[in-house]
Image (tube, grey):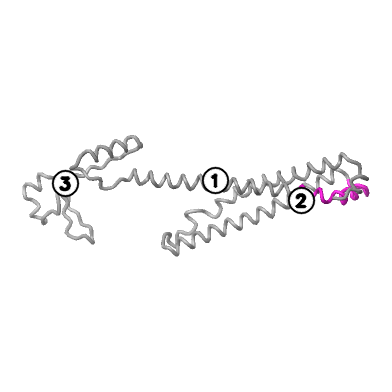
Amino acid sequence: MGIYEPDEENKHYLIATLDQYEAGEYRMYGNFSYAGSVIECDIKSPEVHEKALKYVKANKDMDLWFDMFGEMQKVRTTISAYSIASRFVTVLIAVIAIVNMVNIVSTGIVNRKSELASMQCVGMTRGQLNKMAVIEGLQYAIFATIGAILLCMGGIFLTERFLILTELLEPGKSGTIIKYSEPVWRVFAASGFTFIISVVAAIIPLRIMQKTSLIDQIRSVD
């Protein structure tokens, strides 16, 4: 195959066979910049890719023009590394958040031991205590949901602004990389788990306190 490139700016190519080039037909169009053979391979596995690279390196007359499969492998490796790191950080933050949630809820119940015992003395039932714990857990979940959604929306918005300012994203394609609705269902799922954790963290100390008499609960000083 011969390639003639008269204008590098407009990228005009004329492709002909080697026998046409040798026969002198290039004079009809101009002289060729070079004559050679171009081979394109559609590689689908790393094993074949390694064999192809070894074959090219073993032949001095061959040059590797562009290694698309190798570049895609580098991109996939980088994305996988960032994905593993982000998931590890996410799990770590989730564990810290759960521990803090349990500590805050259970400590709040224990510190109100005398108050809750007094309320039972004036007629509050155990079912009403449990209902109160559920309502408090629901409040934690609602505020956490609202805060998480606002943080996600703000993070997506700032990321898009940064990409637009650095000309990596066209202004008209806002909302195409990450949709604003994408993290919402995950936030709701996490909030439901938070609600369950907060209710359990409140019910357990209530059950433990109910094993002692109301008089001992009122007289207790923490």
The reply to whether callout 3 and callout 1 are in contact (CB within 8 Å) is no
Q: Residue furthest bottom?
A: 165
Residue marked by disc 2: 136
SS for callout 2: helix
Q: Main secondary structure of the magenta part?
A: helix
* Magenta region: 106-124
SS for callout 3: loop
Rendering coords of residue 193 (x, y %) = 67, 44
Horizontal side of residue 136 vs 216, given as left or right = left
The reply to whether callout 2 and callout 1 are in contact (CB within 8 Å) is no
Q: Given the image, on which type of amino acid does mark 3 rest?
A: Gly
Asked whether 109 or 137 is in front, the reply is: 109
Horizontal side of residue 118 vs 105, given as left or right = right
Asked whether 179 or 64 is in front, the reply is: 64
Rendering coords of residue 120 (x, y %) = 90, 47
| Label annotation for residue 114 | none
Residue marked by disc 3: 36
Residue marked by disc 1: 87
Choose mark 2 or mark 1, whichever is in front. 1
Rendering coords of residue 18 (x, y %) = 12, 45
